[in-house]
Image (cartoon, grey):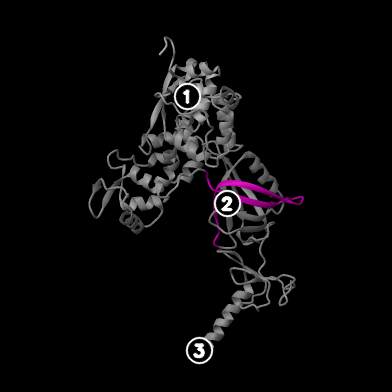
Amino acid sequence: MAKGRREVFDVYEAAGRLKVAVAAWRWAAGSGLVPPADAGARLWSRAVVEAVDAEAVRAALPGVVGAGWAADRLSEALGVPLPLRRPRVTPAAVGHLVRAGLLVYLGGEVEFPDVHPEQVAALARRRDLPALLDRHVPLGPDQAARRLGVRRTDFDVLVTKGFIRPSGSVDIDFKRHGGITTVDLYNAEEVALLPVVWPQVDWRGVRTVEAGRRSPLAGLAPVDPEGGGRLLLAGVARIARVGRAAVVNWRRRNDDFPTPVAGSEVHPEFESTAVIAWLLSHEKIAVPTKPPAAHLLFTRPGGGTRTVRLDDPLLTLAEDPSGEDRLTAWSTDAEADALATLTDNEFGGTLRRLTLPGAPGWAVQGGVRLAGRVETGAGGLHVTLAWPAGLRGTASSHPTGGVTRHALPFTAPGEACACQRQECGGLVPVGWCVEHGDAVAPALEWHPGGGLRCTELEEARRLAGVRERRAVG
């Protein structure tokens, strides 16, 4: 080998050899534009370096962006305004994404690296971005409280009582405000899973407590450091929202189900983290990435319609038509203002369609009012809508919503009947039906399970039963 002739090149030497920016070589290496390091960790042989097209390397990296810019783009991708229970992406989070292999390090501080703008844009377009952030980016206590949807003081109670433990820490230099401070970090997936792992806690009450009030968690017993990390079969069932027998079957049929660490053959105890990991991997539970939402289609006072979205809804239906239905949920200021406008008239608002997970569509013929608007201690806006239960009905399947009108009952419509048949057995006549047309007037009564029901249908069924019993007798 000739004196001074270099046969192995590191990142800086390879970039210098090709007369390209170091960031450009890093991007080429990280994106596969150049062959993998063949002479050791981040070391390339002379033959590999000299075979690389320098112009292609330069063209692949038109520029770099800092961690702050990347963090802002990823935060915007989560939604504007930022969704409920989702903290902003920080520049430090970009460093974690680099270490997870989701972004390529192009220079700068390791904790706050420079990255490729197009790679950031591609990551922002991924539908699983919220799950990726939960999986790879730890949270500080303030961020963890936001992810859980509680006050910082309530999250501190959870930590003190042993419901969750730090997964690491980071030293932060606050400079003018006390110098270097060690801040605990928490696994974001573990934070998000707390309501799943501890279903016995009143999480809705914790999330809606007003500022200055004592934490509802204060009365909870601390988690036993020894036995608190273990679960009986009944505990596993409670987390998975199934019966104990289902867990027994999972254990019998799956060889990879965690092995007991204590207890007896009849009452085995399992290490909780192993069980939770198994439940996740077998899709028996899931990390909540976003709260459920309700969508409400209102009639505008001046005509037309307006859709409003509310997060994490709770619908309470009255058991009597003289009572009142209530819907509580989280809202933005803009949506709450819209609700106030839509319901602020003499007879209240008209709700053409309410859709929310696990419930049929509802419609309310007027009377809807904004009954509450509270800023919670966690910083969110909690609203309550209310309406007379007697005005509630099943929503029409028509895109514009409205109450379904059940017509005269025909328990056995003819073959030529073209009318829509409702779940309760009533018919909604259409003009082209040769049997009924659209001239039949609706006959309705209130009932708690499904809104408005055909009165005449119920009466016809009752009389048919009487006749049948008489014929038998």
Q: Nearer the viewer, mark 1 or mark 2?
A: 1
Q: Earlier in the sequence, mark 3 or mark 1?
A: 1
C-alpha gap between disc 3 and disc 1: 95 Å
Residue 78 in picture, x, y percent from top left: 57, 37
Secondary-structure class at tag 2? strand
From the image, give the main secondary structure of the stretch colored magenta. strand
Residue 297 vs 378, above or below: the answer is: below
**Observer-nearest residue: 452 or 119?**
119
Magenta residue span: 290-319
Badge 3 amino acid: Val
- As drawn, 328 above or below 361: above
Look at label 2 and name its amino acid: Leu
- Distance (Cα) linking label 1 and label 2: 66 Å
The N terminus sits in image quarter: top left
| Residue bearing mark 1 | 48
Of the numbered discs 1 and 2, the one sitting upstream in the chain is 1
- Extreme top residue here? 3
Q: Is residue 405 left or right of residue 157?
A: right
Kindly give the residue lying farthest to the left in the view shown: 264
Residue holding disc 2? 327
Circles 1 and 2 in contact, beta carbons < 8 Å: no
Closer to the chain start, of discs 3 and 2, is: 2
Q: Which residue is mark 3?
A: 472
Do residues under tags 3 and 1 come within 8 Å of each other at their CB atoms?
no
- Residue type pointed to by label 1: Val
Q: Position of residue 348 (x, y in %)?
A: 68, 52
Of circles 3 and 1, the one toward us is: 1
- Up the image or down, 156 lies above or below 411; here it is above
Residue 150 at least partly seen? no
- Res. 88 visible in picture: yes
Residue 423 coordinates in the image, percent (x, y): 59, 68
